[in-house]
Amino acid sequence: MKKRYDVIIIGAGIIGSMVARFLSKYKLDILLIDKEVDVGMGTSSANSAAIHAGYDAIPGSNKALTNVMGVEMWPQVSRELGINYDRCGDYVVAVNDQELLVLEELLARGVENGVPGLQIIDGDEMRRREPKIRPDVVGALWAPTGGIGDPFAATIAAAENAVMNGVDLKLNTAFEEFLIEDNKITGVRTSQGDFESRWVVNAAGLYADEVMHKAGVRPEFNIQPRRGEYLILDKADFQLTSTTILFPSPSTKGKGILVASTLHGNVIVGPNANFVESKQNKDVTKEGIEEIWSGGHKLVPGINHRHIIAEFAGLRATGNAPSPNPAVDYNQDFIIEIPDDVQGLVNLGGIESPGFTAAPAIAVKVIELLEEAGEALEERPDWNPIRVPRPVFRHLDREEQAALIAKDPAYGRIVCRCETVTEGEIRAEIHAPIPADTYDALKRRTWLGTGRCQGGFDMPRVVAILSEELGLPSEAITKKGQGSELLFRRTKDVEQDHLTVEDLL
């Protein structure tokens, strides 16, 4: 007989993983499902990694409330989960008097949203703080609570902490439909069978509209995927003078094309924001790259095409229905609700930027919604909010590295030279609470394959390690799941035809 759950969460991106982690504090049987082979493979796998201060969102909206709340939660959440986070602050840059007026509007909005420490500085001060900024800058909005996170590490860490606290995780498990009796959700039907529960949380990201429609909720609401393309610059070739995020003056398309430091040492440029038809269209286009290069170059003229080592694209889950808050005249707010249409559903939709920033706050809002609905949540005395991170060799000093190698010699064998990732780190991630069993899963956890050679050096060795640890032939090792096998056959196993000189001519 299958286990009956109290809560099933659909989607193991940053939102679903944070909800699972915070709900694991209570005496609940929880199941977290995702259709992919790993957590965080949707929107959470490709974004700016910015922790937004909260001056951009419309006052009173769910975006504004959870953004500002999330910013204040991230220092503690990052400490508990053992992940990096840098409250470095960010700037919105103005290059003319009209854009200075926009800064004044953002300042007023930020003050209304409760963002602390906002200040408009003049052009001279901006150039002093970041000498690589364009020389004709006339001013900037300084937000000291803005910061840089790591959406890959955060999603994995939150999901791991949830699993360590008893949450069941089922990957390769696609939601198909709800089980409903007398207008009450009693579970979900998935590609791996039926699972019963008293509550279901819709955290399906780009597919949240399709999930809610299966429950008869918000038929007017649709997700319009909006693609953002990015460039990554070689950290050996280019760095900003200060660790920060530089935004242009925003437009109707969004916050604009930023130039920002990352926690991994690279500079990121992007994104643009263009609607696409398909929720799987992550194509990087020639026109898109030209657009973001132009935007980034306008902010920081010193960047050069020779600095580029990678290009990628992500999709935002942009909603097109009216806000659930009648007081907010804004048609792209977060949906955070328990709808009246059906019992047993917590509905989260349209979670685009600043969804990463707001994720821990959205998780708290889910708990509040359940309590308001009459759910008696009892805290578990054995709940452990602490996730101890596994060693990152390149972050250790020489003595710590030597001690680690003495304990496990695999940490002394470098597999990825660009990012100094060791065999010990790779094997540890393969056997982690959420095992990394694909190349990309290891990439997200260890950062191998992200340097100048983009995996050209490490890939054969990583495949060999995965093959050995998983007990699979090398040809079965994939980049990101079935259908993305990295190898077809061994070259030396192919019989060579004997060709004559005439055949070659």
Image (cartoon, grey):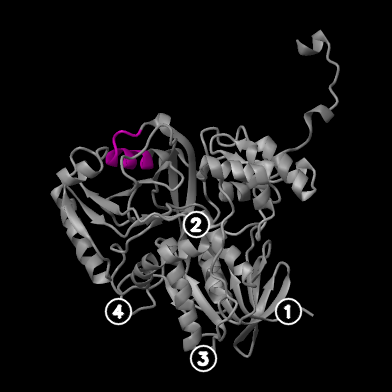
Mark in the foreground, 3 or 4: 3
Which label sits in the foreground, 4 or 2?
2
- SS at mark 3? loop
Mark 2 or 1: in front is 2
- Of mark 4 and mark 1, the one earlier in the sequence is 1
Reading the image, the residue beneath label 4 is: 327
User: Is disc 1 placed on a helix, strand or loop?
Assistant: loop
Instruction: For marks 4 and 1, give the CA distance.
Output: 42 Å
Question: Looking at numbered disc 4 in the image, what kind of residue is underneath it?
Answer: Ala
For residue 439, say whether it is visible. Answer: no
**In the figure, residue 505 lies in which quadrant?**
top right
> Which amino acid does the dot numbered 2 rest on?
Ile
For marks 2 and 1 on the same chain, the one whose residue lies earlier in the sequence? 1
Tell me residue 96's x, y (percent): 16, 47
For label 2, the SS is loop
Q: CA distance from mark 3 to mark 4?
A: 26 Å
Residue 83 - label: 2
Q: Position of residue 417 (x, y in %)?
A: 57, 34
Question: Judging from the image, what secondary structure is the residue with disc 4 in?
Answer: loop
Q: Is residue 295 magenta?
A: yes
Q: Which residues are magenta?
A: 291-303
Residue 299 covered by magenta stretch: yes
Residue that badge 3 annotates = 374
Between disc 2 and disc 3, the foreground one is 2
Badge 1 is on which residue?
Answer: 3
The residue drawn where x is 76% and y is 50% is 470
